[in-house]
Amino acid sequence: MPTVYHDVQQQPLFVFSKVCNVCLQEKPLEQFSKAKENKDGYRGQCKACMREWSKNHARKQGVPERGHASAQALEQGTKVCKGCEKELPLDAFHKGIGVAGRRPTCKECVKQWAHSYHEANKERLNADSRTRYRANREKRLKRIGIYQKANHQHRMQKQRERLARPEQRERRYLYYATFRQYYPEIVRERGRRWRRANPLKVTQSTSRYHARKQAVTVEQVDFARILERDGRWCYICERDILPHHVLEFDHCIPISRGGPHSEENIHPVHGICNRRKANKLLEEMFPIMRRGPSD
């Protein structure tokens, strides 16, 4: 004979009410929002409690209620700052999460707070900054190197534009003059290293200087481009310029006779051929003068 449990209460087939988790009051299901994730298909809080929670949360976030002075000001393109409580235009607030996509405090209040916070925690912030700087030195240098290689032309153009400004030029001259005054040995050593590493630029600068003194036409000249165009070939003796020969650049029409300082008028030559030619034209040289180097 089957056992019968008479003390078991049968659950109702249909549920028409529910107890709210917040106010602990039994209310009809119509006063609860639907939620598929719950077993009974309704939220645990009633709609009235949810509205009250939403109002409190919005009040904490600085969202004005309907009919409030802040809401009326927002309709006019202004907003009341939560810090100074002044009505300011929306442009006076940083963009962010909040009413009209703006932060609750204005830019001036944020600036004052940041300044006071930094002053109160200066030692700790500086120590943290130094620690991060030392700990991420390799990553920072790698990131800077990648950026510089990828944007070399852009960086050079920006630097030229910046240095072309009169105030930057005066500041740079003052800095260099002060540095040369206090560190003359370092300046001389740097100059010697640069001249050894850039012989073509030294020759180019010297040639341009003499051309300007002669008051002839001076154009932008790149000796490396000239060397790439003509190769190591002397147009005077019509022989190759070997690695052990002295490489120089000569003006076909001498600047002392009105020749321009341009890439079309400049060609690579042997040092000895350049001395023999002096300020002559190629047609004025004797054959013995075009014999080239002895080795």
Image (spheres, helix red, strand yellow):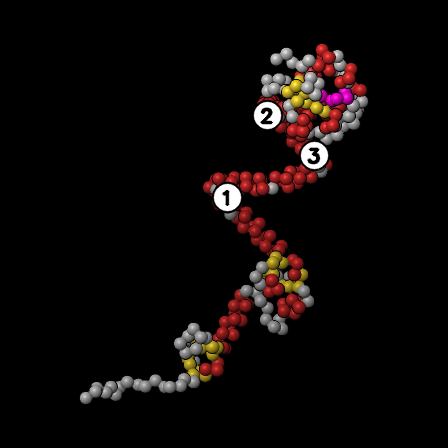
Q: Which residue is mark 3?
A: 169
Amino acid under label 3? Arg
Residue 154: image x %, image y %? 64, 41
User: How far is mark 1 from mark 2, CA to CA?
Assistant: 38 Å
Q: For the residue carrying disc 2, how many other residues have a C-alpha within 10 Å: few (<14), some (14-19), or many (20+)?
A: few
Secondary element at image label 1: helix
Residue at image location 70% in from the left, 21% down from the top: 235
Foreground pick, 80 / 267: 267
Q: Is residue 258 left or right of residue 240?
A: right
Does residue 141 lie above or below 188 as drawn? Answer: below
Secondary element at image label 2: helix
Foreground pick, 293 / 173: 293
Amino acid under label 1? Ser
Does residue 193 lie above or below 94 as drawn? Answer: above
Which badge, 3 or 1, comes first in the chain's sequence?
Answer: 1
Nearer the observer: mark 3 or 1; the answer is 3
Q: Is residue 253 magenta?
A: yes
- Could one spot residue 82 in this view of the protein? no
Which badge, 1 or 2, comes first in the chain's sequence?
Answer: 1
Q: Quadrant of residue 156?
A: top right
Residue at image location 28% in from the left, 85% down from the top: 8
Q: Is residue 196 magenta?
A: no
Residue at image location 68% in from the left, 22% down from the top: 268
Residue 54: image x %, image y %? 52, 71
Instruction: Say the numbered circle drawn on residue 129.
Output: 1
Q: Is residue 23 left or right of residue 4?
A: right
Magenta region, residue range: 249-255
